[in-house]
Image (tube, rainbow, N blue to C red):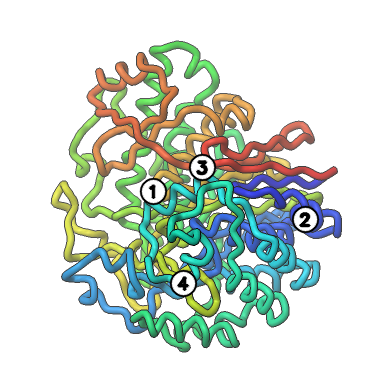
Amino acid sequence: MAWGTHVWNGGSKFMVFQDILEKNGTAVDAAIATMFCNGVVTMQSMGLGGGFLMTLYKRDEEKAYFLNAREKAPLAVKNEMFKKDESISKRGALAVAVPGELKGYWELYKRFGTLEWKDLVQPAVDLCNKGYIMTKHQYNAFFKNKLDDEDTNFNKWFKDKNNEYKKYGSRIVPTKLCKTLSLIAVNGGDDLYNGTLAKMFLDDLKEAGGIITSEDLEKYEAEWMDPISIKFSTQETVYTSPPPGSGAILTLILGILDGYQFDRDNIEDLNSTVLTYHRIIEAFKYAYAKRTELGDTNFVNISDLLSNLTSQEYAHNIRSKIMDNTTFQDPKHYGAVFYDKGDHGTAHISIIDQNGDAISITSSINLFFGNGMTSKQTGIIYNSVIDDFSFPYFKNYFGLPGSPNNKMQPGKRPLSSMSPTIIVDKDGDAKMVVGASGGTVITSTVAWTIIRSLWFEENVKEAVDAPRIHHQLYPMQIMYEYGVLQQVLDGLKALGHKVQRNLSSIVCALKKENGKITANADYRKGGDVYGLT
C-alpha cells in the first residue's frame, strides 16, 4: 500500500501520483515527480528558483536521512549592501540566494531514485503545457507581494489583454517554464548549475543587477546530514530537520511537553483545557527564544546548544520553570537575547510508500512569488531568501539586535522554520509523517498537530482541522484561529496572556495505526490526499 498527502492546488495531481506508484516507483520517485508538478501549480510558494529541506525514513534499514537543499548566500554578498535599505533583501536582484531545489532533487534521485529521471519530470512538462487552473489562493498572493510590472513572463502568464490580473479559475500556461522543464527532463538536474540553463539563468539575473555567478552555481551542493531526533517516553522516535531548519525547536517543544504525560483528559473540560494550552504556549515561548541562537552549522558551532535542545534533562529543567498560574511579558525571561525576523511561505508534501518508507519535504522561495521577478529566458521565479538572514543594523521593537548566528555570510544558508518530520514507533514503522507551510508558525503548527494526534488521541483529520494557537515570543502575544473557544481565551488572558486572532499555516499529515493509514491535507489552503492499494 502507498499513500501520499500534499498541499496542492490543481486537478491533474492524482494521475501524477498514481502513475508513479503504479510503475512501482518509491516514495522518493513520487516525491520528486510531485514536487516538480507543485513547482508549476503552486509557483507562488515554491519552485526551481528556491530550496527545500527533507526528512526521509528507510524502513528496511530502520534509518532516517536528512537532505539540506536550502539556498546559499552568493559568494560576492556583503552585509553593507543592505545597510541603507533592508527592503532590497525582499525585492529585486540582490534578494536572490543561490537556488538548491533542482540540485536537491537530483541528489535525492541519484541516491534513492528507481525510475527513469525523465519519467519523473515528464508529468510536470505535460501539466505545464496543458496549463493549470489558477486558485483563489494564488490569485490573492499577487497582492501580498507585488510582482515586477515589467516582468514579461508574469505579464504573459497572469495578465489579460487589458493588463489586469486574470481571475482565479483562469487557465495558466507558463510557457518559458515548460521549456525549462523539458530541458531538465533530457539533460538532468545539473543543467541549472553547469549547463544550458545555468547560462540563461545567470545572464538574466546579471541584467537585473544580481551578483550570483557561475562559481556560485557550480559550487552548490545539496548536503546529506543526520536528522535531529528525540525519543518520547512512549518510545516513539521523532526525526526532523537540523539547522538551518527548525526541527531542534520542535524537539524542544515536544520534549518539554512529553513530561506532562498529556492525554485526552487534559482537554476534557474548560479548566483543564486552559491549563494545557497555557503549558503549551509557555513551551512555545521558551523554545522560540532558543531559535534566535540557531544558524548554519557549517559556519557556527552550536553543537552544545543542539545537544541541549534534544536532551530530556534540559527539557525537564525548562518544564520546571513553567508556572501554572502566570506568564511573563519580558522575552529575556525566556532566554531571548537576540531576535530573528522569521521566514515566509512554503509548500509541503508527506508520503508513505508500499515499502514503509516515508518522506516529509518542505520547499520554499520565501515571499509569495519570491522576489517578484522571473528569469526571462527560463521562466524560473527567483527566490527572496536573502531576507531570511538577520541583519546587525536593525533592532526589533524590544531593542534586541539581530541574531549573530544567522547573520549573512558568503556561502551561508539562512535559518528556516521548515520542520519536515517523521515519527517512528517502537517497532520501526513510520507512524506519522507531518509538515507544514506558513513561515514562522510552521514549527508550532507541526508541534500542535503531533500533540493533538498522539497525545490527545485525535484522528489525523481532527488534529489537522482543529483551531490552532501559536506564540513566537515576538510579538508578545498568543495568535489564535477562529474556533478557539472564547472561554479558553478568557482563561488565558486571566493568566496574563495577550491574544490576537491572526494565524496562517497549512499542514499535511499521514498517520499509520493498526496497519491502516489515514491522511489529511489542510482545508485552509486546499490540498489533496491520494492512496493506492
From the image, state whether disc 4 or disc 1 is nearer to you.
4
Q: Nearer the viewer, residue 290 or 313?
A: 290
- Tell me the kind of residue under disc 1: Thr
Q: Nearer the viewer, residue 386 or 421?
A: 386
Given the current orientation, which residue lies at the most extreme front position?
A: 162
Q: Residues within 10 Å of mark 4 (few under 14, many from 20)?
A: some
Q: Say whether disc 4 or disc 1 marks the residue closer to the N-terminus.
A: 4
In the rendered view, tell whether residue 120 sits above or below residue 135. Answer: below
CA distance separating discs 2 and 3: 31 Å
Q: Residues within 10 Å of mark 3 (few under 14, many from 20)?
A: many
Q: Residue at x 17, y 56 (%)?
A: 395
- Tell me the kind of residue under disc 3: Ile
Q: Say whether disc 3 or disc 1 marks the residue closer to the N-terminus.
A: 1
State the image coordinates of residue 326 (x, y, percent, origin top left): 25, 24
From the image, state whether disc 3 or disc 4 is nearer to you.
4
CA distance separating discs 2 and 1: 34 Å
From the image, state whether disc 4 or disc 2 is nearer to you.
4
Q: Mark 4 sits on what residue?
A: 152
Q: Mark 1 sits on what residue?
A: 440
Q: Mark 3 sits on what residue?
A: 506
Q: Find residue 79 and report its image quarter.
A: bottom left
Q: Residue at x 31, y 57 (%)?
A: 293
Q: Say whether disc 4 or disc 2 marks the residue closer to the N-terminus.
A: 2
In the displayed structure image, the side of residue 108 where residue 48 appears, left or right: left
State the image coordinates of residue 385 (x, y, percent, origin top left): 39, 65
CA distance separating discs 3 and 4: 31 Å
